[in-house]
Image: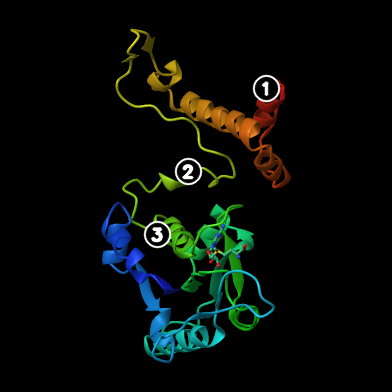
Amino acid sequence: MSVRFDVITLFPELFAPFQTVGVTRRAFESKAVDVRLWQLRDHAEGVYRRVDDRPFGGGPGMVMLVEPLVRALAAIRADQVSTGAPKLPVIMFSPAGKPLTQARVQALSQSPGAVLLCGRYEGVDQRFIDAHVDEEVSMGDYVLSGGELPALALIDAVTRLQPGVLHDAASHEQDSFSDGLLDCPHYSRPEVLTLPDGESVGVPPVLMSGHHAQIARWRREQQLAITARRRPDLIEAARSRGELSKQDEHFLSNLGL
Ligand code: SAM
């Protein structure tokens, strides 16, 4: 099953280079992830093809107009019907949305996809949001100039979960958040690194032991320690889901945090 994203944007050119590089490229080439770009201005009327206007009530900035958005969405719906795609939910990017999580990304990666609305200016006329937007998604507590980078981030996160995109299927299973915790540290060659001041830095000996159970336990404990120090909220969430073993709890209590 492929995942389809219909992206409404004023800057479709931002998406093209992204689809030609990295591990995700194959997913786009094979249409495992089908990204369709919809230039909002193509659905605006008049000589100037306006997509924005001043806010009622005054104040700075411009507001994205309802009517071009309605026409763009109608064109997407018609295309979805003609290609046999289901009616996909509309996700709008907004700092006021729910922060995107790996759990939401995983759910989207197993869904037929979504319409992604990239805001610009001060945002979108609320009447369009009330009538047509199913979900508002935030990238975090900061303000970007548009929803294109959030859309690219969401598409990338979903794409790398598609079967066959990552060379090692287990790779994303040990990523941060997949098991509710942050990732453990990683090491590779050389086994001993010589710093400019002559100091030698090795790697944790357990990683060279060849003892898989001990390595797995060390990694789990590193994950627990990093998560407890940096994101205690994630430890609490994992605990409340019953995902911490007795051994995990013993390790955490010895950390003395
Ligand atoms: N006036 C808006 C506010 O204060 O919340 C900010 C508008 S911002 C300049 C323009 C567009 O960028 C938004 O409509 C949204 O689509 C996108 N955007 C900006 N920051 C974002 C964030 N943290 N998460 C998701 N989308 C964001």
**Label 3 vs label 1: CA separation?**
37 Å
**Label 2 vs label 1: CA separation?**
23 Å
**Residue displayed at 42% across by 92% down:** 46
**Residue displayed at 65% across by 32% down:** 228
> Which quarter of the figure is the C terminus placed in?
top right
Contact between marks 2 and 1 (CB within 8 A): the answer is no
Contact between marks 3 and 1 (CB within 8 A): the answer is no
Find numbered disc 3 in the image and state the secondary structure of the residue it sits on: helix
Left or right: where 168 falls relative to 178: left
Find numbered disc 2 in the image and state the secondary structure of the residue it sits on: loop
Foreground residue among 167 and 24: 24
Residue on which the image places disc 1: 255
Residue on which the image places disc 3: 159
Which tag, 2 or 1, sits closer to the chain's start? 2
> Which quarter of the figure is the N terminus placed in?
bottom left
Q: Is residue 208 above or below residue 140?
A: above
Q: Is mark 2 within 8 Å of ligand 1?
A: no
* Coordinates of residue 62 in the picture (x, y in percent): 56, 74
Which tag, 3 or 1, sits closer to the chain's start? 3
Three-letter amino acid code of the residue under disc 2: Asp
Residue on which the image places disc 2: 175
* Coordinates of residue 178 in the picture (x, y in percent): 53, 47
Color style of the picture: rainbow
Three-letter amino acid code of the residue under disc 3: Thr
Dot 3 surroundings within 10 Å: few (below 14), some, or many (20 or more)?
many
Whether residue 1 is visible here, answered yes or no, is: no
**Residue displayed at 32% across by 18% down:** 191
Three-letter amino acid code of the residue under disc 1: Leu
* Coordinates of residue 47 in the picture (x, y in percent): 38, 90
Q: Residue furthest top?
A: 198
